[in-house]
Image (cartoon, coloured by chain):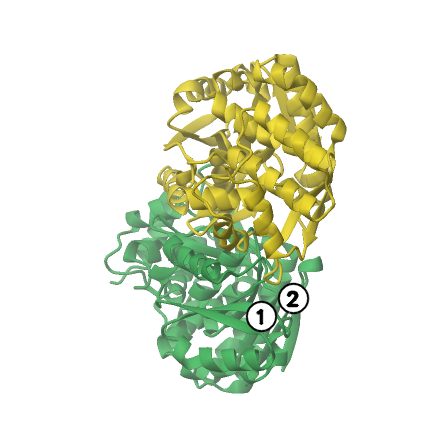
Chain colours: A green, B yellow
Amino acid sequence: MERLTVTLGERSYPITIASGLFNSADAFWPLAAGDRVMLVSNETLAPLYLEPVRAVLEQAGVKVDQIILPDGEQYKSLTSLDSVFTALLKKPHGRDTTLVALGGGVIGDLTGFAAACYQRGVRFIQVPTTLLAQVDSSVGGKTAVNHPLGKNMIGAFWQPASVIIDLDCLKTLPARELASGLAEVIKYGVILDAEFFTWLEQNLDALLAHDEAAMSWCIRRCCELKAEVVAADERESGLRALLNLGHTFGHAIEAEMGYGNWLHGEAVAAGMVMAARTAQRLGQFSEDDTRRIIALLTRAGLPVEGPVQMAPQSYLPHMLRDKKVLGGELRLVLPQAIGKSEVRAGVAHDLVLEAIADCLPA
Amino acid sequence: MERLTVTLGERSYPITIASGLFNSADAFWPLAAGDRVMLVSNETLAPLYLEPVRAVLEQAGVKVDQIILPDGEQYKSLTSLDSVFTALLKKPHGRDTTLVALGGGVIGDLTGFAAACYQRGVRFIQVPTTLLAQVDSSVGGKTAVNHPLGKNMIGAFWQPASVIIDLDCLKTLPARELASGLAEVIKYGVILDAEFFTWLEQNLDALLAHDEAAMSWCIRRCCELKAEVVAADERESGLRALLNLGHTFGHAIEAEMGYGNWLHGEAVAAGMVMAARTAQRLGQFSEDDTRRIIALLTRAGLPVEGPVQMAPQSYLPHMLRDKKVLGGELRLVLPQAIGKSEVRAGVAHDLVLEAIADCLPA
């Protein structure tokens, strides 16, 4: 079992990584006998994981209610949020309830935001079941729902009390979802850790083959990197923005194509290549490094080009709604080398459009 | 001009109280040239105040957009919230925007919650135009919208950057709205300040006649009391709950009667009498003191009985969804004397029902 801590003073919390965690009530610390929880999951995952988790919690004396949402990014909405509140109020659950997010990034972000707002804030626990949620969205307290005009535009910083990562979940994860998670994994290498990027080049096949030792170490390393960044900059006033590499381009793809048609990691993969091409055009990144990124993303089964339907101009309105925009000016995360990146303002829109054009299907 | 500070470390902020503030850009500190704001108001207040405020801000070099919501408690909803987000995203406003709430408690609570959630949190300024908002809801950072199953059930603690109270607004306030604000004013006397309660007994006529000196001092004293309580207990883990006197009963009335049919202050007035009767039945409050409360509320034009349509039993389901409920158990704010109160758990439901019955129309 791997265990690490996100260090945020009185809001610090543990991340536990192992196989078979869903069979152990101890893994669900700080839940204890007499507590009340609302399990939030979706229609795809509930049949796989909800009953075992419910059973282990009930055996430990926890009172469990549940709500099952439809599956998909398009349900990460104010409407779904409202249905969670209705479920909580019908029982009713008090301020001493705990929300448990059992699912991928959509369930985690939405449940976390519901916990941030229900009665002005209740406890919640992240139980991420996809690689993407395990290495990225479940750690760090960013919660949100989407708005038709922009992804993650409505949300809160609200830290979980605990993150519980059961590696067994990845065994049933569809290949496309695994690849989507690997996009965020590769992102950590590009922005922060050249050694980890090299390790990924050497071990990607093991990860794709679900090698447990490799996967366990990979997830731990991503969570470590994220925990360090979040501890240094919880509310994204500086360093934390680096975690957004590829996301400004990627969110434009997700919004324009309709949420759920491109998976988040797929859009981020293409967006990372666009960021690399932008950095190249600025003369601060090498063709060799862009090729290493493209090669690794391709091996992971990820797109390295934007959607054929999207002209470069169609990216800009979405990108100008990015949360990093200040004073109406675009700010982009750009790589400087593999393992090193920066937030840069003042990049000419024409140059950005050219970089996007570099990444369109021939 | 009266000015005081809510002391909350780096989130401290000023409350400014005077006539004619809407004519002075200085009053709108910390807004400055180059800033961008979204004014949020409602259809009733916008014709009165929006243009002057807009003009003074634009003269100071602030870029102003606006959204006008329908008037009424029934619009303090997730749906209205969403329309604020849409207005912000259409422009689009970035994380460096400021939301300005120009209106009563509904506009203030909703705008504050929109600011707490938009892009995970932006700055906001409270410009309360009703007595109720000036003495209570605009100070202290409690923001929320209603859910059909409970008032203020969805919200956040999010402090404003400044509270701007222009006494001129009260001159156009309907008598029923003024009375509703006086319910919260009287509440401060009952829970915290016997001397202030006596002052109110002596000066209520001056307040009802819009005497500016009396009104200015009254608002200052309420804000002082609230600022002290909030500074001591921002997130309502203890002391702050006292500000809820009458609200557990009152919220039941508002929800059962349909939001907006009973004004908030009217429901709180009847609720305070129910709390006093509960305390009397517990042997901890005197009939004389209950009579003083009833007399003062009556002089202010407020109800001191529950709605004729509501049987005592119909209060309980609403009261058990109160945010003070812990472990399924009701916790009530009860007066111990004029100027002294406590939060009390474990009061028998039968006794509560009897106290409500004491307050039904004959």
The one nearer the camera, B308 or A308, is B308
Task: Examine the rendering and report whether any part of residue A185 can be seen.
Answer: no
Say the numbered circle drawn on residue A13.
2
The one nearer the camera, A203 or A22, is A22
Please say if A44 is above or below B266.
below
Please say if B136 is above or below A252.
above
Instruction: Inspect the image, locate mark 2, and give the three-letter code of the amino acid beneath it.
Output: Tyr
Instruction: Inspect the image, locate mark 1, and give the three-letter code of the amino acid beneath it.
Output: Val
Instruction: Determine the residue positioned at 66% across, 31% down.
Output: B291
Q: Secondary structure at mark 2?
A: strand
Quadrant assignment, res B18: top right
Please say if A160 is above or below A46.
above
Check whether the beta carbons of the residues at disc 2 and disc 1 lie within 8 A of each other.
yes
Please state the horizontal and vertical placement of residue A167, each as a whole percent of the image: 52, 81
Mark 1 chain: A
Task: List the residue tagged with mark 1.
Answer: A163
Please state the horizontal and vertical placement of residue A225, each as a whole percent of the image: 60, 66
Quadrant assignment, res A176: bottom left
Instruction: Determine the residue positioned at 55% across, 31% down.
Output: B126
Q: Secondary structure at mark 1?
A: strand
N-terminal of the pair, mark 2 or mark 1, is: 2
User: What is the spatial separation of the Cα atoms under label 2 and label 1, in whole angstroms?
Assistant: 8 Å
The one nearer the camera, B16 or A350, is B16
The one nearer the camera, B180 or A23, is B180
